[in-house]
Image: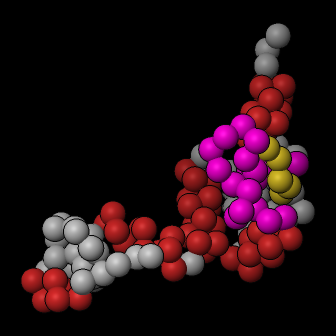
Amino acid sequence: MFKTIDSKKSKGLCVAHRCSNKSTPKDRFCSKHSKRYQKHKNAIKYTYHQKKFRAIERGISWELTVKEFTDFCSYTNYMELKGKTSTSASIDRIRSEEGYHKDNIQILTLGDNTRKMHEDNCPF
């Protein structure tokens, strides 16, 4: 699924098929294909790091380990249900004032999660 051409490595180019960008000094891919390769290689770990980075960026504590997140994903089937539509799965904090930890997360659809956010913050 992720096609590479190793002969391009000696030229300092990204080894991804049809890419002519320069590779990063410590990697054989350019930054764009490095992220795609990590997602292809281990989707759960990639998603874990994306969710953790986003939570910390929003100022919300993240106390989940990779193992806890993997168990959560297998128990709830999160990786197959996630997406961008209103019926896709999202990770919700049960108690909004607390951070992400194994006793405070659940699966909600994106639509329900959005409604919950607006109910909590709606001034009307």
Residue 60, placed above or below residue 36: above
Front-most of 90 and 7? 7
Q: Quadrant of the N terminus?
A: bottom left
Front-most of 2 and 38? 2
Residue positioned most to the top: 124
Residue plotted at (77% across, 26% down):
118
Looking at the picture, how far across and down is residue 109, in whole percent? 79, 44
Looking at the picture, how far across and down is residue 38, in whole percent? 47, 75
The residues colored magenta run: 76-94
Residue 123, placed above or below residue 12: above
Q: Quadrant of residue 10?
A: bottom left
Q: Quadrant of residue 49?
A: bottom right
Residue plotted at (16% across, 76% down):
13
Residue plotted at (27% across, 73% down):
17
Q: Per the image, is 30 magenta?
A: no
Residue plotted at (64% across, 72% down):
44
Q: Quadrant of residue 112?
A: top right
Q: Relative to 6, is 59 on the left or the right?
A: right
Looking at the picture, how far across and down is residue 23, in whole percent? 21, 74
Front-most of 90 and 95? 90
Looking at the picture, how far across and down is residue 63, in whole percent? 74, 66
Residue 66, placed above or below residue 110: below
Q: Relative to 115, is 79 on the left or the right?
A: left
